[in-house]
């Protein structure tokens, strides 16, 4: 598993990060036994960078149980998900996360989103006190705008940011990437499989269950999905010529950007973990990237403008 530095002067982390959101059962039910087996398999294959959140129901406790006795093998991250950024709630949230994770420190503690009701200087100052007390080691952010990222970076060392970034959704190249590079912040790319558009499983006409959030997602519908599918099929063929597949390509591609330290990807089984981990030693060359661009052409999707492409 390749590693990269997470932010200026930060730790070395695996270039593939296991995101545990799928273990919440959002897309399909995952038993406790399967979830624990998945987490243990991740560590076994080198996916020792694990990302969860206060708001990912029950996953912190799953991680704590699965990794008991193996804490020192992993780089654990969690997030403050509640919109209450008061010092009292931060104290409770960190304490709760520590207990659930069965650990005495959180390697990377992230703000899941900005909350303007509380001044960011107060929030950051309180997180720095927890860092100085040894409860957290590094501080990160998620879903912050360019301006908000620049502001928080002036208040203390921020080592990571989590923007949406994938082969298909590249708006971060005009927003998160420049501000993170300017401030020495490492990017942990999320949604690298684009909710399955880059997963190689779904063809035009596929119908998701009504309780699946993708059932009404416009990117899986109509002519836009058909166009996207044609491109992803060709990308999958290109990956096959390199003894890989489109999932592994989607994981490896963001990390080819110097600003990106790791790609977050979920898994619901030991088999998926093993498959995803194979992307961790794939370094795309400049020629590879040129060939990928030629296949993709001008297809770019915009999450906030689902009816438009560039």
Image: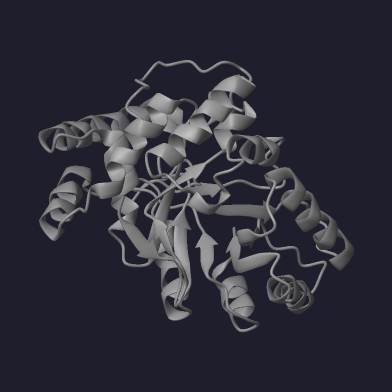
Q: How is the image coloured?
A: one colour
Q: Residue furthest right?
A: 88
Q: Viewed as shown, does residue 241 lie left or right of 100?
A: left
Q: Is residue 152 above or below residue 110?
A: below
Q: Is residue 147 above or below residue 105?
A: below
> Residue 83 at x, y = what percent?
79, 55
Task: Identify the residue at image location x=29%, y=43%.
Answer: 279
> Residue 136 at x, y = what percent?
66, 65
| Foreground of the two, 191 or 255 | 255
> Residue 93 at x, y = what percent?
79, 54
Q: Viewed as shown, does residue 129 lie left or right of 213?
A: right
Examine the rendering and report whether any part of residue 194 can be seen: no
Examine the rendering and report whether any part of residue 254 can be seen: yes
| Foreground of the two, 36 or 52 | 36
> Residue 109 at x, y = what percent?
64, 61
Total numbered badges shown on the rendered structure: 0
Toward which corner of the image does residue 262 lie, by quadrant? bottom left
Q: Viewed as shown, does residue 72 lie left or right of 224?
A: right
Task: Identify the residue at image location x=62%, y=39%.
Answer: 63
Q: Residue furthest front?
A: 69
Q: Viewed as shown, does residue 170 lie left or right of 239?
A: right
| Foreground of the two, 171 or 137 | 137
Toward which corner of the image does residue 295 lie, by quadrant? top left
| Foreground of the two, 90 or 191 | 90
């Amino acid at each position: 598993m390749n590693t990269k530095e997470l932010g200026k002067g930060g730790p070395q982390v695996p270039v593939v990060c296991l995101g545990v959101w799928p273990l919440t059962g959002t897309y399909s039910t995952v038993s406790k036994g399967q979830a624990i087996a998945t987490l243990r398999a991740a560590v076994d294959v080198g996916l020792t960078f694990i990302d969860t959140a206060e708001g990912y129901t029950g996953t912190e406790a799953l991680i704590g149980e699965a990794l008991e006795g193996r804490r020192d093998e992993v780089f654990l991250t969690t997030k403050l998900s509640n919109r209450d950024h008061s010092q009292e709630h931060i104290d409770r949230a960190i304490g709760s996360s520590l207990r659930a994770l069965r650990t005495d420190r959180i390697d990377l503690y992230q703000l899941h989103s900005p909350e303007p009701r509380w001044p960011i200087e107060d929030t950051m100052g309180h997180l720095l006190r927890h860092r100085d007390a040894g409860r957290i080691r590094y501080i990160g952010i998620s879903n912050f705008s360019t301006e908000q990222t620049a502001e928080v970076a002036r208040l203390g060392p921020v080592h990571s940011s989590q923007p949406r970034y994938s082969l298909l959704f590249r708006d971060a190249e005009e927003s998160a990437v420049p501000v993170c590079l300017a401030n020495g912040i490492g990017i942990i790319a999320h949604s690298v499989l684009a909710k399955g558009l880059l997963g190689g499983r779904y063809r035009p006409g596929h119908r998701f269950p009504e309780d699946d959030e993708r059932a009404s997602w416009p990117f899986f519908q109509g002519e836009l999905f058909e166009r996207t599918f044609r491109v992803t099929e060709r990308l999958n063929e290109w990956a096959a010529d390199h003894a890989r597949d489109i999932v592994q390509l989607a994981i490896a591609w963001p990390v080819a950007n110097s600003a990106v330290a790791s790609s977050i990807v979920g898994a619901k089984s030991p088999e998926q973990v093993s498959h995803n981990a194979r992307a961790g030693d794939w370094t795309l060359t400049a020629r590879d990237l040129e060939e990928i661009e030629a296949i993709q052409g001008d297809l770019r999707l915009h999450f906030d403008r689902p009816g438009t492409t560039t």
